[in-house]
Amino acid sequence: ETGVTQSPTHLIKTRGQQVTLRCSSQSGHNTVSWYQQALGQGPQFIFQYYREEENGRGNFPPRFSGLQFPNYSSELNVNALELDDSALYLCASSLEASNTDTQYFGPGTRLTVL
Amino acid sequence: AQSVSQHNHHVILSEAASLELGCNYSYGGTVNLFWYVQYPGQHLQLLLKYFSGDPLVKGIKGFEAEFIKSKFSFNLRKPSVQWSDTAEYFCAVKSRGSGTYKYIFGTGTRLKVLA
């Protein structure tokens, strides 16, 4: 069973640029959630995708957008990068978007915005 | 606004000491509750979860947590910690509204267990 994988591991961008982060969900999982974890903080929920549709969203501006593909892998896109976007971005997958699903986290992508 | 509070940011214990990490949340509706752990150099993994039923839930590695609805609390406990429990612990709440889900994590508690 393959776990959740994310790419790239590290990324450096400059303010104003755009970035795309990728996530492959665990085998058999159709739900993917994205989180932003700033240094010293807990993960903050960005959004969740279930069967290619956005299924929930946290308090993030529209320049944070996502996609989920038919194979249930996912992308997180961030436009007009700001210095405060520097963080670890985590992806988590689960078997089904339900009350009882359990999320499995990937290792994260460390984004630095200069 | 929904929130999750973890009272202790850093905890240092000696091996065999008992552990209790506090977690309180603010949300009036139905919630699912979780504790996650992040060991040094590893990614987040689930320790235990509460969905319904018995408010005392048992997780991996001897951890347990008790859901007290009247106090909006979900404290994590372990009777006797080991050096290998050194990690960061996160409490999380999952809520559902208007057919969509939202997750809120606490800021985490760093536990250091001295051998």
Image (spheres, coloured by chain):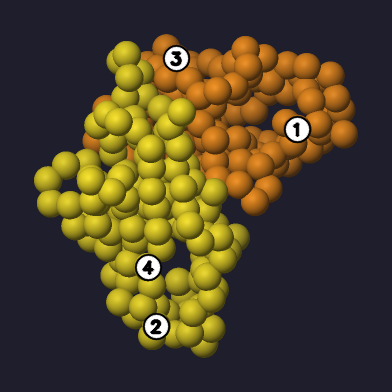
Q: Which mark is residue B17?
A: 2
Q: Badge 4 is on which residue?
A: B20
Q: CA distance from mark 2 to mark 1?
A: 39 Å
In percent of width and height, residue B24 lies at 38, 48
- Amino acid type shown at disc 1: Asp
- Amino acid type shown at disc 3: Glu
Q: Badge 3 is on which residue?
A: A54
Q: Residue at x 75, y 32 (%)?
A: A84
**Badges 2 and 4: C-beta atoms under 8 Å apart?**
no
Q: CA distance from mark 4 to mark 1?
A: 33 Å
Same chain for mark 3 and mark 4? The answer is no
Chain name for mark 1: A
In percent of width and height, residue B63 lies at 31, 66
Classify mark 1: helix, strand or loop: helix
Q: Residue at x 73, y 31 (%)?
A: A85
**Badges 1 and 3: C-beta atoms under 8 Å apart?**
no
Q: Which chain is yellow?
A: B
In percent of width and height, residue B45 lies at 43, 52
Comparing B11 with A22, the one in front is B11
Q: CA distance from mark 1 to mark 3?
A: 24 Å
Classify mark 2: helix, strand or loop: loop
In front: mark 3 or mark 4? 4
Q: Is residue B61 visible?
A: no
Q: Residues within 10 Å of mark 1 (few under 14, many from 20)?
A: few
**Badges 2 and 1: C-beta atoms under 8 Å apart?**
no
Same chain for mark 2 and mark 4? The answer is yes
